[in-house]
Amino acid sequence: MSYRESTLITGIGELVTNDGDQGAYAAITDAALVIAGDRVAWTGPASRAPAADAVADAGGRAVLPGFVDSHAHLVFAGERSAEFAARMDGRPYRAGGILVTVEATRAASDAALRANLRRLAAEMLRQGTTTFECKSGYGLTVPDEARGLALAAEVTPEVTYLGAHVVPPEFTADPAGYVDLVCGPMLAACAPSARWVDVFCEDGAFGADEAAAVLAAGQAAGLGARVHAGQLGPGPGVRVAAEAGAASADHCTFLTDADVDALVSTPVVATLLPGVEFSTRQPYPQARRLLDAGATVALATDCNPGSCFTSSMPFCVALAVREMRMSSQEAVWAATAGGARALRRTDVGHLGAGARADLIMLDAPSHAYLAYRPGVPQIAAVWQAGRLVAGAVP
Ligand SMILES: [Zn+2]
């Protein structure tokens, strides 16, 4: 048997497929994989690999599904390194820091926003992220939010309307008026570019009723729901996400037992963003509590200029293993298949036959090296939809 326009990658020391029971972590050693067009056509032992038009030898290196980063804020201008440095000197992070970025983003040209967005998207790709979500939320006016989402839609299909990121200063005296804007004219202008609606449900941002109203309005406009929940303290975010049938509750740093029950008993994915706790010097989310209870856990970067400016999924995997006591298998699954579930995608996050051919070759023999060698660039090559888009087979 052979495949047309195909590439056989053989000599794979460890091929992580995530094709176990119900999509659980699974891997094959001494493996091979065939890419045909934009899809994975075959995986199995190298000794049984079919012929293909081209052959690449992995030389014993590991191949993994491309990372799926299901939470990122990439449409912004300016930077906040001074705020980060001050925080490291002992001043706590407050949600209000977002407004610094809002001001810079509103003042930026389309070209400047696009250039920053594309630079970050390229940076992600080089680090093995082949699918990423991108939120608005630094415009907070009808035209600025619509502009942010149109720009995001140029680089990813996973576009999230986050008009309800924070109440902008011009609505300080009338937060209800701002929620009406988010649910009305702003949503109407943004929905055509978006797939998702998100809300920052937190003290100092939006409460339970406001968050539920934002999600309901977005869903009525055809968007799927996601929620920023329990980042800064316990709150109603997970409950609101569960009641709305959201795809994901993100952060989950502060959870009640009822929240954990809700995450276990509904399809809501608990998306953990440990780069935030690293960058704000806060306690990490209790991943073991969620995993041991049976919740579905995803890992994502939350890449944004304020609370966490990493775009590196390998860094998040290392944090998850070292700081949150996830096994390397759990962390890699959460950063690939978990992210796919948080985006309700079945074509990415795994490498079974028929999956989109999004894969990374590590310059290392196993997935465990991602946490074993933290901070070391180990992504040798990246394929997206069957095309080699970064690096090269060494
Ligand atoms: Zn976020």
Image (spheres, rainbow, N blue to C red):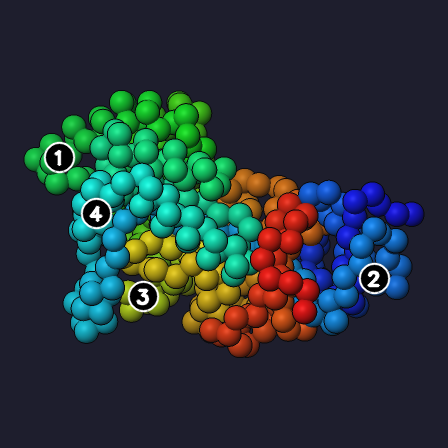
Q: Secondary structure at mark 3?
A: helix
Distance CA(mark 1)–CA(mark 3): 29 Å
What residue is pinned by disc 2?
45
| Residue at position x 61%, y 66% in the image | 380
What residue is pinned by disc 3?
279
Q: Position of residue 388 (x, y in %)?
A: 64, 54
Q: Which numbered disc, 4 or 1, marks the residue that appears first in the sequence?
A: 4
Type of amino acid under label 1: Phe
Relative horizontal placement of residue 49, taking residue 249 as reference (left or right): right
Distance CA(mark 2)–CA(mark 4): 53 Å
Q: Nearer the viewer, mark 3 or mark 4?
A: 4
Q: Secondary structure at mark 1?
A: helix
Q: Which numbered disc, 3 or 4, marks the residue that appears first in the sequence?
A: 4
Q: Secondary structure at mark 4?
A: helix
| Residue at position x 53%, y 48% in the image | 131
Taking depth in this image into account, of 317 and 154 the one nearest to the observer is 154
Relative horizontal placement of residue 238, taking residue 233 as reference (left or right): right
The picture quadrant where one finds residue 58 is: bottom right
Q: Position of residue 227 (x, y in %)?
A: 37, 42
Residue at far front of view? 111
The picture quadrant where one finds residue 323 is: bottom left
What residue is pinned by disc 1?
171
The numbered dot on residue 104 is 4
Residue at far bottom of view? 373
| Residue at position x 89%, y 59% in the image | 48
Type of amino acid under label 4: Ala
Q: Which numbered disc, 2 or 4, marks the residue that appears first in the sequence?
A: 2
The response on whether ligand 1 sits within 8 Å of label 1 is no
